[in-house]
Image (cartoon, rainbow, N blue to C red):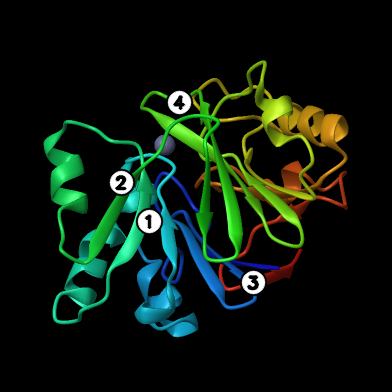
Amino acid sequence: MKLEILGCHGPYAGRPGEATSGYLVRYGNTRLVADLGSGTLARLLDSVTPDKIDGIFLSHLHYDHTSDMLTLKYALENTPIVIDVFAAEQKTNWYLELLNSKNFNIVPIATETQYKCGDLKLVFFKVEHPVETYAVKIKGDKTLFYTGDTVYFEGLEKAAEGADVILADCAKPDYFRGPHMVKRDALKLVRATGAKLIVTHIASGYDAKTLYADIPEAEIAEEGKVYEL
Ligand SMILES: [Zn+2]
């Protein structure tokens, strides 16, 4: 099972070549996309042709996790391709704008429900962020837990239980107050689960590499990098 980082910045990419949240999971012939933020589509299409994408999971509908879904609609519009999109149902104009397409088959998700995507099993968990947001446990020959955007809360450790690798929104220092995890939270999560940590949602103004310099086993996500899980 492999994880490719299509984009790891948030809430915006501040430099040429950077992109916001987007990840590609490969397992056998299965290709699952988790979030598709700004600047991620080109990297995705460089790695996989659209007809080979089995599903797209959207953790939540903030722009930095979804905006390239809009241009993906253009990439698909003259094709018969239909891709399953796992997303929480919303009655908002943005939800319709983003997901209304003959090329998307929307699969509404709910917390602690299990779905299949090709050969992968997916379990979604509601997390805590200003909008409805889900983490996902992705099971192939390994188990990857992607936190989506969230603060630390009771229940997150249980949701991440059994993960080999946790891809976590935790690139903020402990003094940060906002809707994301800080380093202390990520270390708690890793200690409780024994999982390997990949730090993501890198924000301009915070140097994640320096922040985690004393934890050499923590990986800091890098765009274009492929991790063998
Ligand atoms: Zn967010």
Q: Is residue 182 left or right of residue 18?
A: right
Q: Is mark 3 within 8 Å of ligand 1?
A: no
Dot 2: what SS? helix
Res 130 label: none
Which residue was labeled with disc 2? Answer: 63
Mark 3 and mark 2 lie on one chain; the one further toward the N terminus is 2
**Residue displayed at 16% across by 60% down:** 101
Mark 1 and mark 4: Cα distance apart in space:
17 Å
Instruction: State if disc 2 and disc 1 touch (CB < 8 Å).
Output: yes
Mark 1 and mark 2: Cα distance apart in space:
7 Å
Mark 1 and mark 4 lie on one chain; the one further toward the N terminus is 1
Res 129 label: 4
Q: Is residue 159 left or right of residue 36?
A: right
Mark 3 and mark 1 lie on one chain; the one further toward the N terminus is 1
Q: Is mark 4 within 8 Å of ligand 1?
A: yes
Which residue was labeled with disc 1? Answer: 37
**Where residue 201 sits: x, y (%)?**
54, 46
Instruction: State if disc 1 and disc 3 touch (CB < 8 Å).
Output: no
Identified by mark 1, the residue type is: Gly
Mark 4 and mark 3 lie on one chain; the one further toward the N terminus is 4
Mark 1 and mark 2 lie on one chain; the one further toward the N terminus is 1
Question: Residue 82 appears in which quarter of the rendering?
Answer: bottom left
Identified by mark 3, the residue type is: Lys
Mark 2 and mark 4: Cα distance apart in space:
14 Å
Identified by mark 4, the residue type is: His
* Residue 120 in sight in this render: yes
Is 28 placed above or below 206 here?
below
